[in-house]
Image (cartoon, helix red, strand yellow):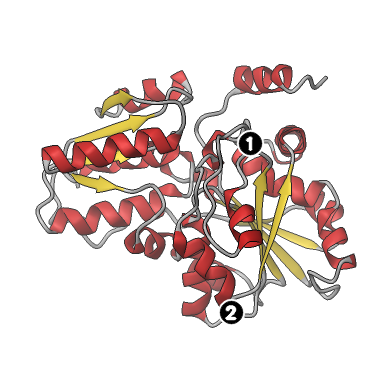
Amino acid sequence: MEGQSGGCEERPFHVVTPVLESMALSEAAGTRVYMKLENVQPMGSFKIRGIGYFCQQVAKKGCQHFVCSSGGNAGLAAAYVAPKLGIPATIVVPGSAAPSTVKKLKKLGAEVEIFGKVWDDANTRAMVRAETDGWVKVHPFDHPLVWKGHSTIIKELRDSLDAKPGAIVLSVGGGGLLAGVVSGLQEVGWMDVPIVAVETKGADSFNAAIKAGQLITLPDITSVAKCLGAKRVAQRALDCASECSIVSHVLDDVEAVEAIERFLDDERMLVEPACGASLALLYSGYIQRLQEEGRLSWQLDSIVVIVCGGSGIHMEELQTLKRHLRMK
C-alpha cells in the first residue's frame, strides 16, 4: 500500500472501532452508556476518518503536496496518510502544540512549521503556503470530504447496536466531528437522535454561535483543551443546529481533567482534555440536569459517547494540567 494512490484508493485508512458498554459511565449517567472508542484509531483520534478520506480523494486528482494546520490530531492524521499516498506533507502547528506532538509529526516524515499562538494563527499561515506554493490545504474540520469521512462513525454504530441510541454525546472544537455525525445520522435515518455537543469554557465558540444565532469569533482560547481551540467554528456546525436536535453544553476545565483521571481509572485509557469534556458531561451529572430542564428525554434507553481520543496526552502532561488548574 505504501507510496501509491492507486491500489489503496478505496481502502480507508481508519479502522472500525469497538463499541463497548461502560459500567462506570452508565452508573454516573443513570442509563446504559456505550463508548465509541475512536481513541484506538491510528494516531489516536477520530481525525483519521475525515482527514484520511479527504487526502485519498485529492490524491486521485494529482495533489503534489499537503499542508495542514493543526493543534495536533489532524496534523498527525495527515502526516500518517501522506507517505502511504506517496505525497509530502507540511504541518503548521501553533506555539501551544505539545512538544511530543511536534516530535511525532517529524518522526512520521512531515515537515513541521511552528507559527503563531493558537490554531487560528497556524491556519492563516497554512492558507498562505497553499496559495504561494500551490499545495493542497487539508482543513482539519471545515470541508465536506472531511465530514463525509467522519460520518462513517454513525454507520458503524448502526451496525454495532441493536437499536438506535437515545442520545449521542460528543466534543466540539471546530465542528468537523459534529458535521460528520449529523451527516451520518441523515444517511442512516436517525435524525431524531439528539446530540449533546460539549465544550470547555474558553474554547466555547460553538455555544457562543448558538446563543448569537451567527458565527462568533472568540477573542482568545483560554481553555486547557487546546484541541477544542478554534476561535470560530465552521458555518456547517451552526447549520447543523437547525437540521436536528443539538443541545450545546459548556463545562469547565477542572471537570474535563477530573474526567480524564476517572476514565483512566475506570477504563484504563488516557485521553486528552478535549475528549474529557464529553466524559465529564456523563460523570458530573449533567445528563440528569438536562433531563430535569426538559432538554433531554427521561426515556433515554442508551447513550453513545464518542471517545474522540487525542495523542497530545501522557502522564506528565496530565500532572502539568492539574498543577496549572491548582487541582490536588
First-in-chain label (2 vs 1): 2
Q: Position of residue 150 (x, y in %)?
A: 44, 60
Q: Nearer the viewer, residue 124 or 192?
A: 124
| Extreme residue toward the right, this view | 292
Image point (48%, 44%), residue name: 45
Q: Secondary structure at mark 2?
A: loop
Going by the numbered disc 1, the residue's amino acid type is Pro
Quadrant location of the C terminus in the rendered image: top right
Label ID, residue 191: 2
Residue 102 drawn above or below residue 227 = above
Task: Determine the residue positioned at 59% across, 65% down.
Answer: 213
Up/down of 53 relative to 253, above or below: below
Q: Residue at x 54, y 62 (%)?
A: 214
Residue toward you, 41 or 231: 231
In the rendered image, residue 206, in percent from the top left (x then y), is placed at 58, 54
Give the answer, above or below, for where 161 lies relative to 272: below
- The local crowd at label 1, few if under 14, some if 14 to 19, many if 20 or more residues have their Cα within 10 Å, is many
Which type of secondary structure does the marked residue at label 1 adopt? helix
Q: Which mark is residue 196?
A: none
Q: Report the side of 13 relative to 225 (left or right).
A: left
Indicate which disc residue 273 carries.
1
Q: Quadrant of residue 90?
A: top left
Question: Is any part of residue 236 visible from this angle?
Answer: yes
Q: Amino acid at mark 2?
A: Met
Measure the C-alpha gap from mark 2 to mark 1: 28 Å
Image spot of residue 122 (x, y percent): 36, 33
> Please, is residue 164 above or below residue 21 in the view?
below
> Which of 306/123 is in front?
123
